[in-house]
Amino acid sequence: MWTWKINTQENPVTINIKYLPNAHLLEQVNWGSWIDLYTYEETILKRGEQRYINLGIAMQLPDGYEAIMAPRSSTYKNWGLIQTNSIGIIDSTYCGDNDIWMFPVYAFKDITIPKNTRLCQFRIQKEQPKINFNRVEALNNPDRNGLGHSGL
């Protein structure tokens, strides 16, 4: 079991990580940046196939935090893959030794992805607090004139 520390300027956060044998070790390149995740093994996909790609790690996120997993910006361009659920949410209860992180993909072409390829990334954030919804007759704020009109 490795312990990985995320250094923030205010409150350092520690995440316990269990790596599968010979998995790529994670690192945070810059404070505030997303953290790259790597394929654990070579993966062969045929066009139209969907699969979970093993990332070779299990984590114990800090209480009150969740992870957001998303494809890297180059994943579709380089590999013809999209993440099947758009983004992944991993809550702090997904923390057992066998709760291995997986990247769910759909292939638009036949590909072979080498071991240790950066396909996706994650960041942690505080879990959403309890919310009370207050019903009102009007919001009394200016309108932006519909979707797609910001800045116009």
Image (cartoon, rainbow, N blue to C red):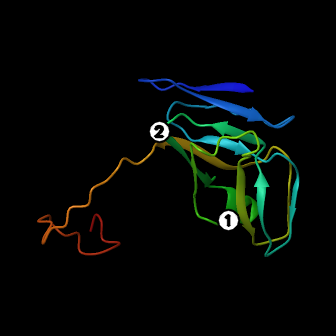
Q: Is residue 17 left or right of residue 69?
A: right
Which residue does the image show at 31% across and 53% down from the upper left?
131
Q: What is the crowding at mark 1: few (fewer than 14 residues within 10 Å), some, or many (at least 20)?
A: many
- Disc nearer the start of the sequence (1/2): 2
On screen, 125 above or below 2? below
On screen, 7 above or below 99? above
Residue type marked 1: Ile
On residue 3, which mark appears? Answer: none
Residue 36 x %, y %? 66, 42
The quadrant in which residue 126 appears is: top left
Which residue does the image show at 58% across and 63% down from the upper left?
86
Residue type marked 2: Gly
Residue 96 x %, y %? 70, 41
Local secondary structure at mark 1:
strand
Which residue does the image show at 71% across and 48% down from the upper left?
101
Which residue does the image show at 55% across and 42% down from the upper left?
123
Q: Is residue 70 left or right of residue 152?
A: right
The quadrant of the picture occupied by the C terminus is: bottom left
Q: Nearer the viewer, residue 89 or 46?
A: 89
Residue 33 x %, y %? 54, 38
Local secondary structure at mark 2:
loop
Q: Nearer the viewer, residue 120 or 14?
A: 14
How far apart in space, not on screen, are marks 1 and 2 (Cα)? 29 Å
Q: Nearer the viewer, residue 9 or 137?
A: 137
Q: Nearer the viewer, residue 22 or 120?
A: 22
The quadrant of the picture occupied by the N terminus is: top right
Residue marked by disc 2: 64
Residue marked by disc 1: 82
The quadrant in which residue 147 appears is: bottom left
Q: What is the crowding at mark 2: few (fewer than 14 residues within 10 Å), some, or many (at least 20)?
A: few
Question: Which numbered disc, 1 or 2, marks the residue closer to the eye?
Answer: 2
